[in-house]
């Protein structure tokens, strides 16, 4: 194997320059900017590959002004691009695809929705599409080269602008599970992160808490005449299930923190429930203030072996103490602002 590798790469040692080395009918680039820098890295920097393509006068398969990455595959008469925002920022950019024909569609892996992209242009052997990515959001951009174009007449732009209908800024009733140290049902005059709350049962709480409120739509909006209403949760840590008027609208776990509430929305008397779950780090930190009752000298504690009730007051159990009393608490809960929005016509 070493002999074969040396024949292919020219050397078993990584060189300081990147070649190229001619082998057969192709060129091999290694070393230099193609050297993998980190121990856990598998691939060289993406910019290194781009620089070689430019030297070969080959246009990039995909490019944009934002920090986006992509994967491209072809299936029959269909070109499939997976494009992902690798940043925590909103990205609005023109994406250039090295494809000359085909009706582009947007497939959302988060919701499963599929819709046509109506705003695009074809120029110099590529298709240019303006796209908008929420933080860490990704899409499949699919080009159908069969010649069957089905434009979506409802959406004239690729990403319709949303307008705010109202902000839910009233009092929230929030219920914390007492079995996990929560205080039961409390009132939040305004939305605030649990780790900043004065009540230690909330400050160190880990689990699910249910937010409840009621709201009416403003007089100039009618759910029977208007359509495409959404609930935007704003900032959430870390998961949220939305229930409107008894109807489960699913779980939100990433940006955009937005749920379609068009079906089931009432003009008045809407009952909104939001179940929010956080990580268990804060509970581990809170438990660190209580007497230790875990393994000692690699032996299980007596209460665990004998199946007896714990007396330490701790709620969690681990075989290693990853967090201490002074470890920083993680942001938890519904921070908001929570808004009702709709597509601007």
Image: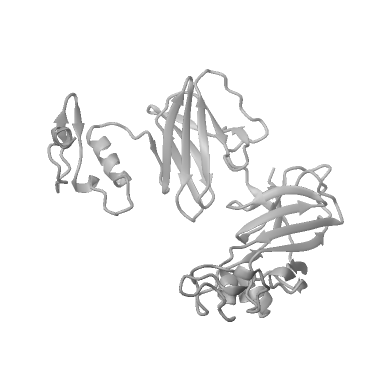
Percent x, y of residue 123: 41, 29
Query: Which residue is situated farthest in the top direction here?
Result: 147
**Point 64% across, 36% down: residue:** 155
Nearest the eye: 149 or 24: 24
Percent x, y of residue 38: 29, 54
Rendering quarter of residue 96: top left
Which of the image's four quarters has the C terminus?
top right
**Point 23% across, 32% down: residue:** 56
Decide if residue 170 is in sight here: no
Rendering quarter of residue 156: top right
As drawn, 101 above or below 330: above
As drawn, 190 above or below 118: below
Percent x, y of residue 231: 70, 53
Nearest the eye: 176 or 120: 176
**Point 47% across, 70% down: residue:** 298
Query: Which residue is situated farthest in the front direction here?
Result: 306
**Point 59% across, 38% down: residue:** 157
Percent x, y of residue 242: 72, 53
As drawn, 295 above or below 261: below
């Amino acid at each position: 194997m070493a002999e074969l590798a040396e024949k292919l790469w020219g050397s078993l040692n990584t060189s300081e320059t990147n070649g190229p080395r001619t082998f057969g009918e192709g060129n091999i680039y290694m070393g230099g900017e193609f050297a993998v820098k980190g121990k856990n890295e598998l691939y060289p920097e993406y910019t290194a590959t781009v620089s070689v393509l430019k030297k070969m006068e080959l246009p990039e398969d995909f490019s944009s002004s934002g920090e986006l990455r992509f994967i491209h595959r072809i299936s029959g008469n269909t070109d499939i691009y997976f494009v992902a925002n690798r940043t925590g920022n909103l990205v609005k950019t023109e994406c250039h695809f090295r494809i000359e024909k085909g009706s582009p569609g947007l497939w959302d892996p988060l919701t499963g929705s599929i819709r046509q992209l109506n705003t695009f242009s074809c120029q110099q052997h590529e298709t240019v599409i303006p796209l908008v990515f929420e933080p860490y959001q990704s899409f499949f951009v699919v080009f159908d080269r069969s010649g069957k174009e089905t434009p979506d007449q409802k959406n004239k732009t690729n990403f319709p602008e949303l307008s705010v209908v109202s902000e839910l800024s009233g009092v929230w009733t929030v219920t914390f599970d007492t079995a996990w140290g929560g205080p039961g049902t409390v009132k939040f005059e305004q939305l605030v992160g649990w780790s900043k709350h004065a009540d230690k049962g909330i400050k160190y709480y880990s689990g699910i808490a249910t937010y409840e409120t009621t709201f009416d739509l403003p007089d100039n909006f009618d759910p029977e005449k208007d359509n495409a209403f959404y609930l935007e949760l704003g900032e959430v840590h870390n998961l949220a299930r939305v229930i409107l008027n008894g109807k489960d609208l699913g779980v939100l776990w990433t940006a955009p923190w937005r749920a379609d509430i068009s079906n089931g929305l009432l003009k008045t008397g809407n009952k909104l429930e939001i179940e929010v779950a956080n990580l268990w780090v804060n509970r581990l930190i809170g438990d660190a203030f209580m007497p230790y009752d875990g393994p000692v000298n690699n032996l299980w504690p007596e209460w665990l072996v004998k199946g007896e009730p714990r007396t330490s007051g701790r709620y969690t159990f681990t075989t290693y103490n990853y967090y201490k009393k002074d470890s920083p608490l993680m942001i938890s809960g519904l921070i908001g602002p929570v808004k009702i929005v709709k597509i601007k016509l």
